Amino acid sequence: MVSLEQAVAVPYATRLLADLGARVVKVERPGTGDFARHYDSACGEVSSYFAWTNAGKESLTLDITHPDGREVLDRLVSRADVLLCNLSPRVWERLALDLPPSLIVGELSGYGWDGPYADRKAFDALVQSEAGLVSLTGEGDVVARAGISVADIAAGVQLQSAVLAALLQRGRTGEGVRLRLSLFEAMAEWMHQPMLYAAGTGAAAPRSGAHHPSIAPYGPVACADGAVHLAVQNDGQWQRLCGLVGLAPEERFATVTSRVEHRAELQELLEQAFSDLTATELLTTLDAADVPAALTRPITDLATHPQLDTWVDVPVPGGTARMLPPPVAGFEWSPGAVPALGAHNDAVLTWLGYSSEERTALRVRCVL
């Protein structure tokens, strides 16, 4: 797989494909590379974003605007099974690559290739905002973007699954396909449920912080040393919780709708009942009563979570980063390093048939 990629969405798709065994050649700008390399400095010499989305790939630096660089790219594409790209639609069109009929091509844009938004910049937070996610996230009058790059992740997962389907189709027909996906459409797909809710009820669900907008009690409840997240979704769970805290049947809490209407009062009663328990003690008590709950943990706890024991140290430029294997077990996987910029120039060019002298000449002409 060859990928003209940057930032998060397509790099995430190709990282997922690399996890499944694909050989991914990542084409980067000479000198600077993918700008996501430098979002932060949390993982050695590269950012946390770059380490997360680029493990197991090969990095080839290439000035694709130089005639010699374009020749290298053409050779690379001619040998590829899959070509993925999230260059801007206009830059992609200007490249005018000669694409073999058996090639699977995946093109990602921000808002699509047509329509009034086709030329707009589209970054994750902007797409979250346009698709309505920001308007639903937060509490009261305060809105918030989601804490992770959900638009990029949505697009990356959709693109990965489309590539896998296209490979199956090509195995039957021998024909490639041109896949097109936009960040906005991927995010809009994930927004179906709240959109349907708003259309069916006449209003969007209210912003309710970490609490569920239409179910209660469904959210964090404070206790002696932190909080436990409740998720009471049916009458049986509600009755068991009532028995646990000694809450008598009351009309104001009789149904899910009424509990949502009286959420603040219910929250106060629960927190009074749990105020002397630590989070661990409360979770143990709720588990024993078969009331769904979880600890509200900080992100720093994830690396030592007792349920996760498969962390591996993955080499990154300038150090290592602890990462998890693919979450779906059942196939062989070994961790691949996060590549330094241009780390595979010689290997890829040799594979393409360039001699040592030709590789040196490309470096002298600043193509690599």
Image: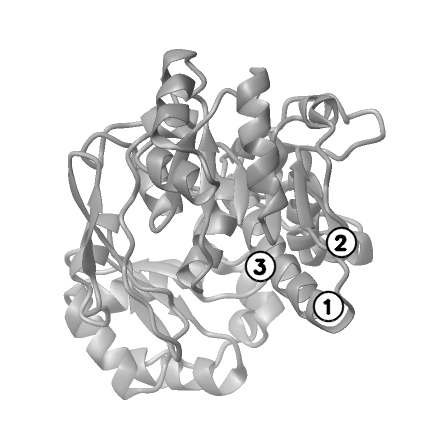
* Mark sitting earlier along the chain (3/1): 1
Residue where numbered disc 3 is placed: 261
Q: Residues within 10 Å of mark 2 (few under 14, many from 20)?
A: some
Q: CA distance from mark 2 to mark 3?
A: 51 Å
Residue in the picture at 80% in, 50% down: 202
Left or right, residue 116 beside residue 358? right
Q: CA distance from mark 2 to mark 1?
A: 9 Å
Give above or below for 348 relative to 282: above
Q: Mark 2: which amino acid?
A: Val
> 296 or 78: nearer the eye?
78
Left or right, residue 366 beside residue 316? right
Say how many tags the image has: 3
Residue where numbered disc 2 is placed: 177
Assign a secondary structure to mark 2.
strand
Disc sitting over residue 169 in the figure: 1
Left or right, residue 347 beside residue 23? left
Mark 2 and mark 1 in contact? Answer it, CB < 8 Å.
Answer: yes
List x then y, in percent, for residue 187: 64, 46
